[in-house]
Image: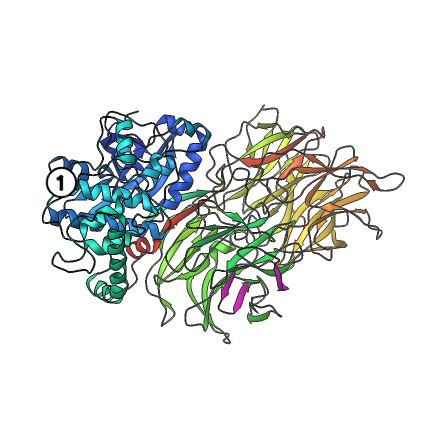
Amino acid sequence: MTLTSRTRLGAYEVLSLIGQGGMGEVYRAKDLKLGREVALKILPATFTNDPDRVARFRREAQVLASLNHPHIAQIHGLDEVDGIQFLVLELVDGESLDKRIACGRIPLEESLAIAKQIAEALEAAHEQGIIHRDLKPANIALTGDGQVKVLDFGLAKAVETTASQSNLSMSPTITTPAMMTGVGVILGTAAYMSPEQAKGRPADKRSDIWAFGCVLYEMLTGTRTFNGDDVGDTLAMVLKGTPDWAALPEDLPPQIRPLLRGCLEKDRATRVSDISTARFLITQPPAATVTGLVADPPRGRARWTRALSTAASAIAGGVFVAVVFSSIRRVPSPQPVTRFTYRLGEGDAYSSLGQHLLAISLDGTETAYVANRRLYVKPAKDVEATAISGSELRQGPSEPAFSPDGRSLVFWSADDRTLKRIATTGGTPVTLCKAENPFGMSWEGDAIFLGQGSNGISRVPATGGTPETVIRVQDNEQAQGPQLLPDRQSLVYTLARGNDPERWDKAEIVVQRLGSAERKTIATGGADARYVQSGHIVYATGGVLFAVPFDLRRLEVVGGPTAIVEGVARSTGTTGAADFAISQTGTLVYVAGPASTRASRLDLALLDRKGSVDRLRLPPHPYQVPRMSPGGRQLAVGVDDGMEANVWVYDLSGASSIRRLTFGGKNRFPEWTADGARIAFQSDREGDAAIFWQRADGTGTAERITKPDQGHVHVPIAWSPKSDILLFDDIDGSHAALWTFSIRERKAAPFAAVRSSYPSNFLPTARFSPDGQWVAYSSDETESQTTTIFVQPFPATGAKFQIGNGITPLWGPAGKELFFSPGIPGLPFLAVSVETQPTFRFGNPISVPRPGALVVGGIPGNYDIAPDGQHFIIVVDAGDSPTRSAVPQIQVVLNWFEELKVRAPAK
């Protein structure tokens, strides 16, 4: 496939074709987001049609992207657009080394200068445990200013194609029939392949040293070290042949000849073992005398081995001087910003949605995340993440934070509502203290700071103990995301007010000294702030990260906010968590989400009890809390984009289009009366979050039902079968209580003292049984404070039945079943058989399939049951929704501070 100029691939515009090779076409392109030119390497269809190879390649590319060195061409990212897989690479302008050699041998001084830079690139990669595996002149570029760039680093491990026998120096990685079994795979290019690779054995850094020797020999002589008429002859030369040592220049420095022999030893046990040796010898002045190195070709292996051993001793003696002079002469150049995506394993799913899922160690070498109700750690140098044994929880851990030394993690356990510490290598977690669900947490020195919402900010010793409140907040305030600043005396955190769902996007970023009641507001309109070592405060508004320059000495912002990253997953409803983390070394990791939390694209769909999904013919919108009418002919649903929130009604027969029911203020959480004549909903049209109702056909005006106390919020839950009693939640900022409202008496009263923590847990949701004699509800009133389904008689008599752990109970239309969600994304609904006469009895739960994209999250009421008892109305991600990737993934940006300094320069 050949792309034409001006073709768009996502954020890239193709400019021209650069060349073609075994791995596909390479194009010059423009990065339209960052305004830079890049190289796009389009991977061939034979490669992209193999999911296993693509998955392997992605994993390898992520590791390779961690290489940051001036002589290594960078991998900026790996992307896919319309089925086209392509690498985004640093664009290197210049000619390849093979074309330079084609003009004849390269002068000695220039050859050694090039070899030195190649050795430096290899040394940097080998220190990270990364091997090139396919070093050859065609993979080495020479820029106009004399700089060397090594290309395609390590890609031979990920791409296994078939060799072309027509051009040995340009042939792609070659294979044997053993590749079909994955054993004995030959990786490399024939003319530069080490003997062990030619035999199908694993490559290590000594294989790169062999190839380095071949390249250096070729530069010095103008001919390939091992040359044959075809691949077979060339491999035979590699295994049995001897280079023509007489072809080397006569004026070759005395240490280079034994170096070449050492690099090209066929037995890798006696080959030069570290490229730093080559780098050292190449940099020695031509007139320098190094004991044991002689100009004449040695006759045996022992002689050059002794020479290199002596050279190694010289290196050891000169390291200090070399480091001193290096630090004087070299001015660090900005490291390139590199982006790539780490995809979680097949079947993995994030846990604890709505809370922080990510953490990164201070040095950026490890990332932790929460999935499958346990913790995982992904070292930067490894391809795969490792599950931390001992972190498995029934409800899953949340809010992970690394210790300063990176050896431990602290997390919150919803199972027993405690903070726990665990080694990153796994083991038995240690309980530190009891705690409410943290609104952000950080491990600073020997203490852990945790946001506690309306209870302020607490500090607990890292070894465990009683939490101490260090920042207090006023009524109607919530504190989130504490971080100790480098002065070790001040905290930066977020302060939100009220229960407005948008409170976190209206919150203040505050700095406050420990022991002082004085606050200093440094920014408004965002949450989840972090101080980073580039001299900035970074915070989230919607799904966008903003940065402001920050004077650490004066504790003041010294510039305006700049949007720096778009599309970060957020929770704006409960804790305000933004799923990103930043290391002190400048690595940014985040979970992708919509750029605006106000515009989630969701679909409404019908789900049957076999798991089949039939999407309604409605445009995607941020739908919430769908409710079927009692007759099953209509649907009421909230649409909340953050700017506006209203209730809409849809005729399920398709006879009419969806129509808007509510006007004025923000209106949410619809609930049909049992006769289908009216719909109750929450509205702030009169300044408080009260419950109103109006006729379902849209005639008449809305009428207020409840009057919340100051600072309280009311949410309608369910109507009794006679439409005379409304169950509703009364939320005061820290707790949610279940109440009833009598339409006849116009009077509210608490129902059976049912209360739940809020917003530390799901809202208590409830439903009347079809005969009106029972109420099923969810609450965290158990000793373990786990959200649990209960059933009580109505009116309450004191009897109570505990059904199981979960949220959002629904009665089947005949009153013979209870359905509920376990409250964990990806797990099926549960159904329990129920008998109410002559006594209340219930059976064991059975699974009801549901799609993995079902949205439950922080809105417990996001599904309803149809009157036939065989279908559910559910909210699912739209097919083109940007809110969540089909495959959970983590975005990684290396050297992000370089970009931050340019886009939001600190004064």
Q: Is residue 232 above or below residue 125?
A: above
| In the image, farthest residue toward the right | 838
- Judged left or right of residue 414, residue 360 is left
Amino acid carrying label 1: it is Ala
Tell me, yes or no, whether the highlighted magenta stretch contains residue 462: no
Please state the extent of the stretch shown in magenta in the rendering: 427-450
Task: Tell me, yes or no, if residue 277 can be seen here.
Answer: yes
| Front in this rendered view, residue 159 or 669 | 159
Would residue 568 be found to the left or right of residue 800 on screen?
Answer: left
Q: Position of residue 121 (x, y in %)?
A: 27, 49
Circle 1 crowding by C-alpha within 10 Å: few under 14, some 14–19, many from 20: few
Q: Is residue 444 magenta?
A: yes
Instruction: Identify which residue, 225 or 542, lies in the foreground.
Output: 225
Whether 635 is drawn above or below 354: the answer is: above
Place residue 399 in its image quadrant: bottom right
Residue 5 place in picture, x, y as percent:
24, 29
Q: Is residue 727 left or right of residue 733?
A: right
Q: Position of residue 167 (x, y in %)?
A: 23, 28
In this picture, is 149 found above or below 477? Answer: above
Residue 69 seen = no
- Mark 1 highlights which residue? 247
**Which of these two is toward me, 491 or 171?**
171
Q: Quadrant of the N terminus?
A: top left
Is the image coloured rainbow, by chain, by secondary structure, or in one colour? rainbow
**Residue sitting nearer the eye, 313 or 208:** 313
User: Which image quarter: residue 725?
Assistant: top right
- Dividing the image into 4 quarters, which one contains the C terminus? bottom left
SS category of the residue bearing label 1: helix
Q: Position of residue 305 (x, y in %)?
A: 27, 52
